[in-house]
Image: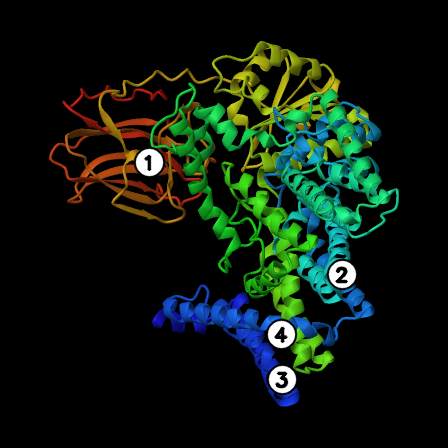
Amino acid sequence: MSRFLDFLAGRPPHHVVTAVVLAGVATLTLLCGLVRARRGFLRYVPGTLYVLTAAAAVGLLGVPDVAGPRGVAVLAAAAVWLAAEWLLRWRDADAAAVPSAVSTRVGRAYLIAAWGAAALLLLPRLSTYAGSLLTWEAPVVSGFPEVSGFARAFESGESVWRYLLDRFVWDNGVLSAGHTSLFYGAPTYALFHVAGFSAWTLRILAVVATWLSIGAVYAVGRRYFGPIVGAAAAVLYALNGCVLFYGRYGSSPAGTLLAVLLAVWSVWAFLGRDRPPWWSGPVCAAALFAATLQYSPARVVVLILLAVLAGAVILEWRRLTWQRLLGVLTLAVAGGAVWTFEESRHATSSFLHARGEQYFFFVQYPTYVKELFGRDLLGRPLGPGPLTLADKLELLYRVVEFNLPYYADLLIPVVEQQPLGDGDGGSLPQLYYAPLAVFIAWGAASSLRRVRAWPHATLWLWFGIATVPLLLTNRVDSHRMVLFVVPLTVWAACGVGEAARVMTAARVPRLLQHAVAVLLLATVVNADLTLLHRRVVAAPAAGEAILADVTRTTGPLVVGALIDHRDLGWVHLSMLERTRRDPAQRATLVQEYRLQRVADTAPSVHSATVAEFERTLRHGTVLLAPAGQFQKLAATFQQRGLRVAEGGTPILRTLRVDAGATATGMADTTVRVLPTIVLRPTPTPMPLDDGPQVPLTDLTPRGVEFGFEPPQFDRAWGGDDIVMRGVRYPRGIGVHAWTRLTYDVPDGATAFQSVVGLSDDVCDEAAVAFEVYDEQGRQLYASGVIDPTTGPRFVRVPVTGVAAVTLVVTEGENGRDCDHANWARAAFLLGAPPPTAAPGAAPGGT
């Protein structure tokens, strides 16, 4: 109970505020109905009680220690909902007698309000959203080995018209290839040529697509579900956190939603007319084709719409006039023409491919199952050979079993959500605001009773059929379920329409109805502000360091940086703008896989890549970062008489290579020229014992304590591979000082061994000390202070007769800044104690 009181003592969560308002509106409606409408209102009482009890259930979500009351509220809501549904057979007969509270003028006012609210939520900080680019935006700008981004098209001189024509060819339709979409990619590429490259121009057309989608939702809702539903759908769609999130970053979902809504409108308009005009068939075909040129989930919806269209024509064959038949024939011919065109471009295999992350791909290539799911779904490794029928059926079951919990988590009301974003604590959005589940359930029930009408049938088929391929992929998340927002929004709007009818039947004044609607929507806006507009995130420090060097460099420039792709994409936009403004100042980015060939971790400097750099260095500059990863390459350039200078910031040091002051116009006094680079000798592999052992990352620690952030297992503290002095370690524990990890010593263990040291990415201020203790607090090992000048050290501690060991990393007596430390290849050795290694040997990463 104390936890419950603490919960109430704090600021009420957003969903609680909305639930309280809902309960207040339901109570007000009940009182008005009993006082003003009296007996005529009795049949609507269950609907009012449903909202009241459902609001109570929503308000209790996330509250600890109230599972019982919450369950009672849910059961009560279900009971009154069933009662309301039973009474609907009487109410439906006189539903037309209940006047609508939304006229055409009022509906348009709600639409304008929805547009305004969306603008206020979408536009602020659009150019600095999340501090840098998001994970899905970076490939859109720079591309990656499998897909080319905007940059490659621009740098190759591809015209806007050529780029537009290429968008009519199907591709894999992945999220991170949004530049290949028709409604987002093509207009954004054109905007870059007109307004320049920036985060704002990268994202603004997703905002525009979202605005247009709001109008499309309003038009579809009003035309096929009534004025109340149209107005409610526009507002709920505009305030949907999922829609707003995908409207704020540069990728294809916002354009996909618009394309799908236009396809829905065209199909329903064709079916809704007994004698459709001659042009309705081509328009319908064009809209359906355009929807396939976006994010691949839209293609599933297009197939559903085609099935609805065919089914409606067959079932309503009595209405098959020559105009309708002509439209159907036009659609069929257009479909054949599209397929022939795509086949000529060898693109038909990409229609539903979606990068191969589907059950049928798993069956064909079973060795990828562990890589895509993170574990062996069948409890054993799958080889490259063909699977048996039993294996295929079991794999099918396991894939669905794996995805169902994630699917359910996105459909049930969730109230505890982190601010939306990417990294830095950000999360993906839910499909709807939790309290709207009250209206979604009501509207879905209303839609199910009218499922014989093809608009309602479309929504249910959409929701049901699109679920099947989703559950057969390797991952269910908001990205792949974003199109479910449309049926959920329409059902929520239908639920609002049902509630509005009840309020009208209760004789609640129309002005008061609109007032409570505005109050409810204000609570939704408040929740959206919290999710979308968290604290302002500063620009990426690594990106800023590189951008500063780019800005002060004249002439052609090649940049090679092994930093976070989000930060690098953010820098790349400025480089592209520099090239757009002055082609003589061309700045290009080296792809990561080519850069890895000349990094210090490579066995040798790749001569072909060095030759490419030298072609630039005849009249331009090469910028490399981080400086510590390109010492071999810098030494090679020095030996060939080139000027190597150091720049950047304390966060990220950079290397600047050019042919000197004569070639670049920058005197030696303006750059920090490095002395002759002396390379460290290649580390001699340490004789780590490879006999029987138990890696610590295969065990569960008895206790974990930390002062800043929790440890990472089989990764460095920052999430990358463990790398010390250029040696990469696949196993180990990455920590940020201070930390303490306690492990029970396994039976038969005779020693503990590890390679300890700092990650290569630390700054000069880093300093730590490693210590090992037994269960009685006796010190078994102490490394002394280790800083960036100290190489990794080898630890081997006898543990015979020891029950537990505690691994400690301290802050080295100078604070915790940059203290990224590693217990690489940490393991308990089994069997006879190995000989102690010679002190001072350098560790190996094998």
Q: Residues within 10 Å of mark 3 (few under 14, many from 20)?
A: many
Question: What secondary structure is marked by label 3?
Answer: helix
- Kindly identify which residue carries mark 2: 222
Amino acid type of disc 4? Answer: Trp
Q: Is residue 784 above or below residue 17?
A: above
| Measured Cα–Cα span from mark 2 to mark 1 | 71 Å
Q: Which quadrant: the N terminus?
A: bottom left
The amino acid at mark 3 is Gly
Spatial CA span between label 3 and label 4: 18 Å
The first of marks 4 and 2 along the sequence is 4
**Tag 4–tag 1 contact (CB < 8 Å):** no
Q: Which residue is mark 4?
A: 90
Question: Label for residue 33?
Answer: 3
Spatial CA span between label 4 and label 1: 82 Å
Of pointers 3 and 2, the one earlier in the residue sequence? 3
Amino acid at the residue labelled 1: Val
Q: Amino acid at mark 2?
A: Arg
Which image quarter holds the C terminus?
top left
Above or below, 525 against 801 in this view is below
Give the residue pinned by disc 1. 785
User: In 3D space, how far apart are the residues under numbered discs 3 and 2 (Cα atoms)?
Assistant: 27 Å
Q: Closer to the observer: label 3 or label 4? A: 4
Question: Which mark's residue is nearer the viewer, 4 or 2?
Answer: 4
| Image colouring | rainbow
- What residue occupies the far left of the structure in this picture? 801
799 vs 266, nearest the viewer = 266
Kindly identify which numbered label has been placed on residue 103: none
Q: Are marks 4 and 2 in contact (CB under 8 Å)?
A: no
Labels 2 and 1 touching (C-beta < 8 A): no
Q: Can residue 784 be seen in the rendering of this structure?
A: no
Q: Residues within 10 Å of mark 4 (few under 14, many from 20)?
A: few
Q: In the picture, residue 685 is in which quadrant? A: top left
